[in-house]
């Protein structure tokens, strides 16, 4: 399921003295099965952009297509689109409301008209994808779970709708390092095993460097850079001018090169950096 934007512009409080442009003539296409990272300074338009992907916001001008369906038309069934393009907002556990995990995660499928039996199967599958045991957790109150478990239950509520596209806005915000790694590992597993399209909004350069296939950089409501992580992080000076960093290991390689060591700066992981340094020093591993 592809998402395509054509010359999309959007302003909050349009046609008022308080009007503020959030997107400026944005065109892009996300293909089925991609794992895309979206980064940019605060206020660059990232969250506004992703809310156009399933019709939560509609452009002031331009077109948005999901699987060929024009979301800007009045008769478009946005509820059906949102079942296929799932959105997980920052701190999604704030949206928990059910008395039990089963009720909360099963809300979407139940509203879609599925039987109790089918709802339970959907919930069981969704919880398994986020690493939670259905029998252990289904009757617990979501409000009594740990922070990481709440985050997983909230994500499972979106997965229970069996979306083709999963959009995540800072899904690891506020989690400890262990919780962050678990959530990101489960998202990667979803992408690899189900072929689900993933759009990950994050401030972590390390995360996108090792996870995504394609990296889009937003600046002042426009797309500033779009390419592989290696291509984008190769624009280190431009990223720093935007107020963004590069992965720490990439920064180290730039420092080593500046000090005369013949190493590549197209390095995004510690393992690759180790190989590159050993080769440059002429050591035997």
Image: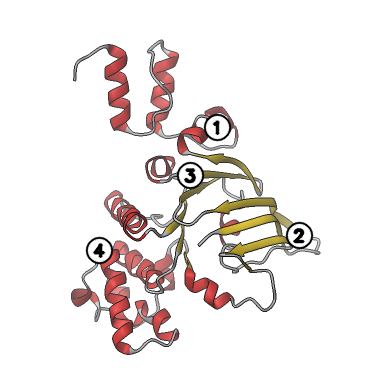
Of pointers 1 and 3, the one earlier in the residue sequence: 3
Q: Is residue 115 above or below residue 48?
A: below
Of pointers 2 and 4, the one earlier in the residue sequence: 2
Q: Is residue 173 left or right of residue 11?
A: left
Nearer the observer, 189 or 145:
189
Looking at the rendered structure, the secondary structure element under dot 1 is helix
Looking at the rendered structure, the secondary structure element under dot 2 is loop
| Residue that badge 4 annotates | 131
The residues bearing labels 1 and 2 have C-alpha atoms spaced at a distance of 29 Å
Q: Which mark is residue 214?
A: 3
- Give the image location of residue 212, x and y in percent: 42, 46
The residues bearing labels 1 and 3 have C-alpha atoms spaced at a distance of 19 Å
Nearer the observer, 263 or 40:
263
Q: Which mark is residue 19?
A: 2
Q: Is residue 192 left or right of residue 202?
A: left
Location of residue 117 (image quadrant): bottom left
Residue at 38 percent across and 66 percent down: it is 155
The residues bearing labels 4 and 1 have C-alpha atoms spaced at a distance of 37 Å
């Amino acid at each position: 399921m592809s998402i395509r934007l054509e010359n999309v512009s959007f302003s909050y409080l349009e046609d008022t003295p308080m009007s503020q442009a959030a997107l400026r003539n944005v065109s892009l296409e996300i293909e089925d099965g991609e794992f895309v990272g979206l980064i940019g300074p605060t206020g660059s338009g990232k969250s506004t952009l992703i809310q156009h992907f399933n019709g939560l916001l509609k452009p002031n001008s331009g077109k948005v297509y999901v699987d060929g369906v024009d979301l800007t038309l009045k008769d478009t069934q946005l509820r059906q689109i949102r079942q296929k393009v799932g959105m997980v907002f920052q701190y999604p556990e704030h949206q928990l409301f059910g008395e039990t995990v089963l009720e909360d995660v099963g809300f979407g499928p139940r509203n879609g008209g599925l039987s109790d039996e089918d709802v339970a199967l959907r919930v069981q599958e969704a919880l398994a994808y986020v690493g939670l045991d259905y029998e252990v957790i289904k009757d617990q109150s979501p409000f009594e779970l740990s922070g990481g478990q709440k985050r997983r239950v909230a994500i499972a509520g979106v997965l229970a709708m069996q979306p083709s596209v999963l959009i995540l806005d800072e899904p690891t915000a506020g989690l400890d390092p262990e919780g962050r790694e678990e959530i990101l590992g489960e998202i990667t597993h979803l992408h690899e095993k189900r072929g689900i399209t993933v759009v990950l909004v994050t401030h972590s350069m390390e995360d996108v460097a090792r996870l995504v296939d394609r990296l889009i950089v937003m600046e002042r409501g426009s797309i500033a850079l779009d390419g592989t992580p290696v291509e984008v992080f190769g624009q280190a000076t431009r990223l720093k001018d935007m107020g963004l960093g590069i992965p720490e290991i990439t920064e180290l390689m730039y420092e080593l090169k500046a000090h005369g060591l013949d190493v590549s700066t197209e390095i995004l992981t510690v393992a690759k950096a180790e190989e590159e340094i050993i080769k440059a020093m002429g050591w035997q591993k």
